[in-house]
Image (tube, coloured by chain):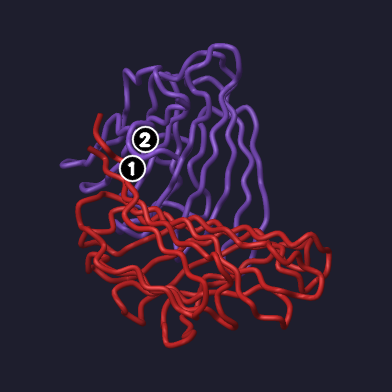
Amino acid sequence: MAAGSTYTPIATTTLTATAGIITFSSIPSIYTDLILIVQGKFDVAGDLRYRLNNDTSTNYSFTILYGTGSSNGSARSSSVSSGIGDSYGNIDTTLGNSVQILQFLNYSNTTTYKTSLVRSNNASGGVDALVNLWRSTSAINQIDLAKNSSMSGTWQIGSTVTLYGIAAA
Amino acid sequence: MANTFTLISSTTVTSGTTVSLTSIPQTYTDLLLLVSARSDYTGGGAVSFAMSFNSNGSSYTGRSIQTYSATSVTGNSTTTVTYNGITGALLRSMASCVSGASTVSTFANSSIYIPNYTSSNYKSYSTDTVSEGNTTASNGPQSIILDAGLWSNTAAITSIDFGLEVGSFVSPSTFYLYGIKNS
């Protein structure tokens, strides 16, 4: 990748107060892909989940490959109301213990459903590779990040999420 | 436009058993390390690395999932190992080797992402490694390995050392270190 111009920080959120949802809105459609780097802390350990364009309908599905150190396997879920950012490589109650890397491919096109690839890591929980599908042809212009499928946990102070734009040219 | 994805250093090794990336600047948010490496070990199978931060040999933990014997999947916990004087986290199968059925010019490739490497939190990292040897032999180097790692240390990362498990590096094994800024 060429240095500089194709890997652009769009926005960074570092919480100075607890929050239920971290939102990136008004995402410009000028890039090819989006990358989210998440280093978070929850009130209680839980899974990172996301919704796109505030879509709360059951338009999401995902498949997971996971390893816990002592076991491994795969899982999937269809027609659910949020995408997933981790399974065993989840966010716990200590900053720095985990990192989730989400890539939204071809996010601004208005022809195809949207796929995201995720690598999530928690050294005491596990490691995951995930794929999500959002069944919408809309360009992604908003990402909401929260805990668990209920989207109802609490992000803790110091949690940091950065959104980057990757341009093909 | 801000230069937010910057090559910090490129290291090409033609022999030897260790690599040191030192004097890492503290001006970025995250680090991305891309490794292409091969060992000249002829005993078969794949060759691993020890990776240490700041020459510190303790407090490495992790979980991994990997293919093995060509068609099966297994999970492991990361242990601390010492290879060629480097004590650190075990990174499995980062250097393919010359087993009986592997392809001579095949190198393993790894991507290591280290977020917030200057913070005072513990340092987590994400590693993806792939190696393919055009063989179905159970002791071949072919593998896909995903690692979740943690260095339970609050120091900013200023250096990264690698020690090869067995054999010596084959030319050109490369280590490209990039810095990523979020502003």
Pointer 1 residue:
B5
Q: Are labels 1 and 2 on one chain?
A: no
Quadrant of res B136 = bottom right
The amino acid pointed to by label 1 is Phe
The amino acid pointed to by label 2 is Tyr
Q: Residues within 10 Å of mark 2 (few under 14, many from 20)?
A: many
Distance from the alpha carbon under mark 1 to that under mark 2: 6 Å
Quadrant of res B41 = bottom right
| Residue B97 place in picture, x, y as percent | 67, 73
Q: Is residue B134 left or right of residue A125?
A: right
Q: Which chain is red?
A: B
Using the image as rendered, state which of residue A21 and residue B104 is in the foreground: B104
Secondary structure of residue under mark 1? strand
Name which residue lies at 38% across and 37% down.
A146
Q: Is residue B82 above or below residue A146?
A: below
Name which residue lies at 54% across and 64% down.
B172
| Mark 1 chain | B
Labelled pair 1, 2 in contact (Cβ < 8 Å): yes
| Residue B11 place in picture, x, y as percent | 41, 63
Pointer 2 residue:
A7
| Residue B14 place in picture, x, y as percent | 52, 72
The quarter in which the C terminus of chain B is drawn is top left
Disc number for residue A111: none
Secondary structure of residue under mark 2? strand
Q: Which chain is purple?
A: A
Name which residue lies at 75% across and 75% down.
B99
